Amino acid sequence: MAAKALSFVVGDYVVYPKHGVGRVIELQKQEIAGTSLELYVLRFEKERMTLRVPTNKAESVGMRKLSSDKTLREALDTLKGKPKVKRTMWSRRAQEYEAKINSGDLVSIAEVVRDLFRPDDQPEQSYSERQIFEAAASRLARELAAMEEVDEPKALVKIIDILKVAAPAYAKDKALA
C-alpha cells in the first residue's frame, strides 16, 4: 500500500519544513475513515507540539533527515557571505524571507539570517524584521544543535559569532560606497 516512503525510526531527528527540527517519538497505526494508516508521530519541543504525518506522505510534505555535514558547512559559509540587500518593498521581502524559512532548506534559511543580521553598531531593525530574523536564526540553530549534539542556545551563539566576525568587513564596504 505505501509508496516508496522515507524511513525514519523512533528517536530520529527530522526536519519538517514548516516547523523545523522535531523528533520521531512513535510510529502509530490508526484507522481513519475505514483506511488503515501508518503515522510518524513527531514532537517539536520548542513549540510543545505533536504532529502526526502519514508515512506515505512524509516525502511529499518535504519531511527529511537532518542535513548532511556538507550542507551544514555550506549554510555556515553562507553566513560569512556578503548580505544581499534588496531595494523592494518590505512586504515583498518579508514574504520571500518567510518562504525561504518554510522551505526547510538550511542554506536558504542561512541566507535570511545573514541578510537580516544587524551588528550592534548598525541602525535598529523594525519589529517585523527582528521577528523574521529570530525565527530564521532559531530554525538554523535548532538544526545545528541537533547535528552537533549541543543545546539550541549554544548553537545560536555559534551562529551569531560567525555573523559578528563577517559583518564588519561588509560594513566597511558600505561606508565606502
Image (cartoon, helix red, strand yellow):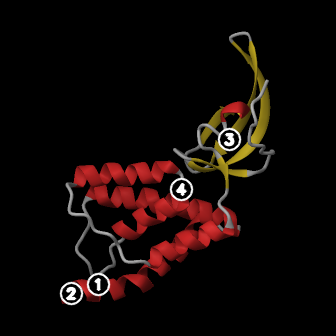
Q: Which residue in the structure is indicated by mark 3?
A: 42
**If you read the primary sequence from the N terminus, does the residue marked by circle 4 or circle 3 appear first?**
3
At label 1, counting other C-alpha atoms closer than 10 Å, the crowd grade (few under 14, some 14-19, many 20 or more) is some
Q: Nearer the viewer, mark 4 or mark 3?
A: 4
Q: Which residue in the structure is indicated by mark 2?
A: 175
Q: Nearer the viewer, mark 3 or mark 1?
A: 1
Please give left or right for residue 84 compared with residue 135 in the image.
left
Identify the disc placed on residue 84.
none
Q: CA–CA distance between discs 1 and 4?
A: 27 Å
Q: Position of residue 29 (x, y in %)?
A: 79, 25
At label 2, counting other C-alpha atoms closer than 10 Å, the crowd grade (few under 14, some 14-19, many 20 or more) is few
Identify the disc placed on residue 105.
4
Q: Residue at x 47, y 65 (%)?
A: 110
Query: Would you say the residues marked 2 and 4 are in contact, meaning their CB atoms lie under 8 Å apart?
Result: no
Q: Position of residue 39 (x, y in %)?
A: 73, 31
Disc 2 element? helix
Q: Quadrant of the C terminus?
A: bottom left
Query: Would you say the residues marked 2 and 1 are in contact, meaning their CB atoms lie under 8 Å apart?
Result: yes
| Vertical order, 30 against 106 (above or below) | above
Q: CA–CA distance between discs 2 and 3?
A: 47 Å
**If you read the primary sequence from the N terminus, does the residue marked by circle 2 or circle 4 appear first?**
4
Under mark 1, the amino acid is Ala
Q: Position of residue 62 (x, y in %)?
A: 59, 43
Q: Which residue in the structure is indicated by mark 1?
A: 171
Quadrant hosting residue 89: bottom left
Under mark 4, the amino acid is Asp
